[in-house]
Image: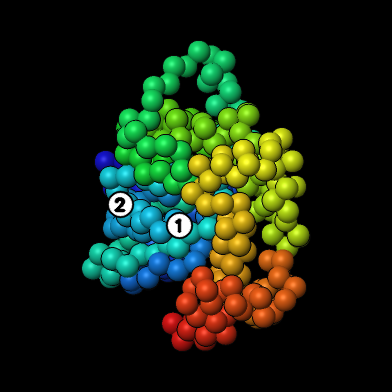
């Protein structure tokens, strides 16, 4: 019932494909009525919940397909490929994108532990590696509905929005994705803090030794733990984040040379070479293809 109500709100408020901002910061509604192949994207820490249709994400070669039975939990910034290849006017995709605030999620996780909350193992048996698909439960559906409803009116969004968002975060931490999310947002997770720093400073030189020092680990330990969380080595992650961000900027109309500089590439030839190696097209070919789409 909650999913159908959320769908009705999205249908009433969203009149074009893509993401639509709501009055609650960090909460976006989205629609897709045409098939879109998976393309480079960078997910910020987020929950993506589908109420109609299906969506795909690819992380380091692993494909995640999810619909109204499961939501996607991505607790750290990650370079992915994402798309809606099954969407059509007869089978539209409707969903909600909720940004996860690292500070609030960390506070809630700590408060829950201090209050004596007992958390069992991840029921899926999956280790924390980048992305997790989790089953909708009643608390998740109800709190998401209240969050979307609060975003409809300006006063409710201002007064109730932060409370509804916190309530929704709590439902995530209590649900099937909770163990996975708590691992990322726990007070001692230096890897998550390192990822956040990289995501915020892509234009600056990034040293793996500096990342390890920032995390308080040796290079070897940092490399191992980093790959456990993201599925990638630190070097591969930084390169994927930079190229993914550049691809998104180019698709948005930014000049190739400007996009390269924005993500830290001083050498145009190196940028072009690494872009083509990752995406199979030169930046110019990619730009032309996006313009023709």
Which residue is most to the front? 220
> Residue 216: x and y, percent?
71, 35
Render colour scheme: rainbow
Q: CA distance from mark 1 to mark 2?
A: 21 Å
Q: Residue at x 40, y 67 (%)?
A: 38
State the residue position of label 2: 67
Quarter residue 135 falls in? top left
Which residue is most to the top? 116
Of callouts 1 and 2, which one flags the residue occurring earlier in the amino acid sequence?
Answer: 1
Of the residues tagged 1 and 2, which is closer to the observer?
1
Q: Residues within 10 Å of mark 1 (few under 14, many from 20)?
A: some
Q: Which mark is residue 9?
A: none
> Residue 279: x and y, percent?
49, 73
Q: Residue at x 72, y 76 (%)?
A: 267
Q: Quadrant of the C terminus?
A: bottom left
Work out whether 21 lies above or below 277: above
Quarter residue 16 falls in? bottom left
Residue toward you, 63 or 181: 63
Work out whether 24 lies above or below 277: above
Residue toward you, 129 or 108: 129
Q: Residue at x 69, y 51 (%)?
A: 208
Q: Is residue 173 left or right of residue 225?
A: left
Residue toward you, 6 or 226: 226
> Residue 277: x and y, percent?
52, 74
Residue 27 can be seen in this image: no
Quarter residue 132 falls in? top left
- Circle 2: element type: loop
Mark 1–mark 2 CB contact (< 8 Å): no
> Residue 60: x and y, percent?
45, 57
Which residue is most to the left? 90
State the residue position of label 1: 60
- Circle 1: element type: loop
């Amino acid at each position: 019932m909650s999913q159908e109500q959320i769908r009705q709100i999205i249908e009433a408020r969203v009149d074009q494909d893509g993401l639509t901002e709501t009055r609650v910061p960090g909460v976006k509604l989205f629609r897709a009525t045409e098939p879109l192949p998976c393309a480079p994207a960078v997910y910020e820490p987020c929950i993506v919940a589908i109420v109609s249709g299906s969506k795909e994400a690819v992380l380091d070669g692993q494909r995640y397909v999810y619909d109204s039975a499961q939501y996607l939990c991505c607790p750290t910034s990650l370079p992915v490929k994402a798309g809606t290849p099954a969407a059509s006017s007869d089978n539209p995709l409707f969903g909600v994108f909720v940004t996860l605030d690292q500070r609030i999620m960390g506070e809630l996780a700590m408060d829950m532990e201090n209050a004596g909350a007992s958390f069992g193992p991840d029921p899926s048996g999956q280790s924390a590696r980048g992305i997790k698909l989790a089953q909708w439960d009643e608390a998740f559906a109800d709190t998401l509905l209240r969050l979307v409803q609060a975003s409809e009116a300006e006063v409710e969004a201002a007064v109730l929005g932060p409370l509804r968002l916190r309530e929704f975060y709590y439902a995530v931490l209590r649900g099937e994705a909770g163990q996975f999310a708590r691992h990322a947002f726990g007070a001692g997770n230096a890897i998550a803090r390192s990822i956040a720093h990289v995501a915020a400073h892509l234009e600056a030189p990034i040293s793996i030794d500096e990342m390890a020092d920032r995390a308080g680990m040796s290079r070897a330990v940092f490399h191992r733990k980093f790959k456990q969380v993201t599925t990638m080595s630190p070097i591969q992650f930084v390169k994927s984040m930079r190229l993914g961000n550049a691809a998104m900027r180019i698709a948005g109309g930014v000049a190739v040379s400007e996009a390269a500089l924005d993500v830290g590439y001083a050498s145009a030839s190196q940028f072009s070479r690494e872009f083509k190696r990752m995406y199979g097209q030169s930046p110019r070919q990619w730009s032309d293809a996006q313009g023709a789409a």
